[in-house]
Image: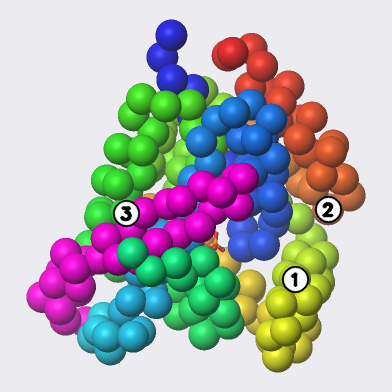
Amino acid sequence: NKNIVVAIDGYSSCGKSTLAKALAKQLHFIYVDSGAMYRAVTLYFLRNHIDLQNEDQVKKALDEIDLNFHAKDYNTHILLNGEDVSEEIRQMHISENVSAISAIKQVRTAMVKQQQKMGRSKNIVMDGRDIGTTVFPHAQVKLFMTADPKIRAERRYKELIAKGENVTLEEIFENLAHRDYLDTTREESPLTRAEDAIILDNTKLTEEDQLNFALDRVTPFL
Ligand code: C5P
């Protein structure tokens, strides 16, 4: 009766968090959005004008950051030193800086440590870029999600427009491509499919199809 870990990795805006949330809700597992943690760190670094080249500044900033999740109905709310920053971290200026900041070794070490602690004793679904490779290499279930880049950009565009953000489809497309490039080519735990991860291309799948696919993989471990 070891706790069950479901690791969901993949490119930007592939629907990882939508699936992860639905799966966690269905199974009564804890959901953790690891990307939200990197985004909250990015917000803190930008607000405090941290020089990314300066190791001491980076270390000090990481020591000052306290991250917490408040799960309200599986819509993760993330608290940065007590402040709910869930909305702010979705803004374009965060998306434009997050991949550079999450490539910093000290940043990754600090986040991975915290993530591993969260998955030590509870059933959990975590989504991100390095969950199946680095954070939980022994996860019982690993999914690697992909989707057509144009579809991904369109989905994200609709989401941001609905929130009233002033963005263009081209801008989103470029941002996704740029983040995927940085995330897959960085030195420290780059985005890559774990050997034992199952590929889930959701270009043509409904949310229900994806949930059923994932449930089929998890059920044997329940
Ligand atoms: O998942 P989301 O798109 O919100 O993640 C934002 C960024 O955070 C990614 O583009 C990536 O640079 C970084 N990230 C990461 N490792 C994770 C999750 C996110 O490097 N496990």
- Residue at the (76%, 55%) spot, across then down: 147
Q: Of helix, strand and loop, which one carries label 3?
A: helix
Residues at circles 2 and 3 in contact by the CB criterion of under 8 Å: no
The residue that label 1 is drawn on is 159
Q: Amino acid at mark 3?
A: Met
| Residue 212: in magenta span | no
- Quarter of the image with the N terminus in it: top left
State the separation of the CA atoms marked 2 and 3. Answer: 30 Å
**Disc on the earlier residue, 2 or 3:** 3
**Disc on the earlier residue, 1 or 3:** 3
Which of the pair 62/86 is nearer the observer? 86
Which of the pair 20/102 is nearer the observer? 20
| Residue 54: in magenta span | yes
State the separation of the CA atoms marked 1 and 3. Answer: 27 Å
Q: Of helix, strand and loop, which one carries label 2?
A: loop
Mark 3 neighbour class, 10 Å CA radius: few under 14, some 14 to 19, many 20 or more: some
* Vertical relation: 116 (above or below) 157: above
Q: Position of residue 68 (x, y in %)?
A: 36, 54
Per the rendered image, the range of residues in magenta is: 53-81
Q: Amino acid at mark 1?
A: Glu
Of discs 1 and 2, which sits in the foreground? 1
The residue that label 3 is drawn on is 111
Q: Is residue 117 something one can see in this rendering?
A: yes
Q: Position of residue 36 (x, y in %)?
A: 48, 61
The residue that label 2 is drawn on is 203
Position of 107 compared to 99: left or right?
A: left
Of discs 2 and 3, which sits in the foreground? 3
Q: Is residue 7 something one can see in this rendering?
A: no
- Residue at the (78%, 38%) spot, across then down: 210
